[in-house]
Image: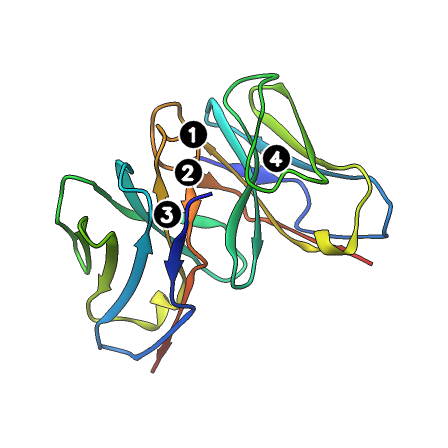
Amino acid sequence: DVKVTQSSRYLVKRTGEKVFLECVQDMDHENMFWYRQDPGLGLRLIYFSYDVKMKEKGDIPEGYSVSREKKERFSLILESASTNQTSMYLCASSELGTGELFFGEGSRLTVL
Amino acid sequence: GEDVEQSLFLSVREGDSSVINCTYTDSSSTYLYWYKQEPGAGLQLLTYIFSNMDMKQDQRLTVLLNKKDKHLSLRIADTQTGDSAIYFCAESPDNFNKFYFGSGTKLNVKP
């Protein structure tokens, strides 16, 4: 069974802390994505990566960075967390040239 | 990003049909998608339609595409309580590197 695993389901952090959200996929997919989900706003793309060490900004990259050192792992980094980054973060992957995204279960981050 | 719009809520009775609507802006989108998100879970692809099709049927699901009006709909026949979820439409205008999602429609099915 295909799987996208996000390491933390729930996190609570303080303003100014550095936050790492990890995502691992076991399908050998080239593309990986980080989305943010907020009520009434749907999913907004933060960053995506189409290969190891490659990354492209999505629609809302400010305040975030990413790392893709291995094909199966895509990390989202909040250098200095702020309260407006409280949200649900969804990782997804897809095979190159196909349109089906496979999502993890999400990481709910609360920044106090 | 692109604008993909959906109404936020829909409530139906068990056994009725549900119709969830979506409008999108990019006429170059090759595929349009419907994803389902159950409580506490990530999104799962429900169905998709190629842009040169008007309709696609898959068991209880019917997708209708009106390219002229850039309108997509998902009809669920004989809606069940297990269909209660958030439904997202999405488009991918550029070779599957970016996907644009609507705000999601929360479907509530009353017994």
Tag 2 near tag 4, CB within 8 Å: no
Seen at 17% across and 53% down, the residue is B66
Which residue is nearer to you in this view: A111 or B91?
A: B91
Seen at 86% across and 52% down, the residue is A14
Tell me whether marks 1 and 4 sit on the same chain.
Answer: no
Q: Which residue is mark 4?
A: A23
Left or right: B82 with respect to A9?
left
Rendering colour mode: rainbow
Count residues near mark 1 (Cα–Cα under 10 Å), then give few for <14, some for 14-19, many for 20+. some
Q: Which residue is mark 2?
A: A101
Give the spatial CA distance, label 4 vs label 3. 22 Å
Q: Which residue is mark 1?
A: B97
The kind of residue on which mark 3 rests is Ala
Give the spatial CA distance, label 2 vs label 3. 11 Å
Tag 2 near tag 1, CB within 8 Å: no
Total marks placed: 4
Q: Which residue is mark 3?
A: B90
Toward which corner of the image does residue B10 lie, by quadrant? bottom left
Q: Chain of mark 3?
A: B
The kind of residue on which mark 2 rests is Leu
Give the spatial CA distance, label 1 vs label 3. 13 Å
Above or below — where is B47 with respect to A69? below
Which residue is nearer to you in this view: B111 or A93?
A: A93
Q: Position of residue A81 (x, y in %)?
A: 79, 46
Tell me whether marks 2 and 4 sit on the same chain.
Answer: yes
The kind of residue on which mark 4 rests is Cys
Give the spatial CA distance, label 2 vs label 4. 14 Å
Q: Position of residue B109 (x, y in %)?
A: 35, 76
Q: Foreground mark, 2 or 1?
A: 1
Q: Chain of mark 4?
A: A
Seen at 47% across and 22% down, the residue is A30
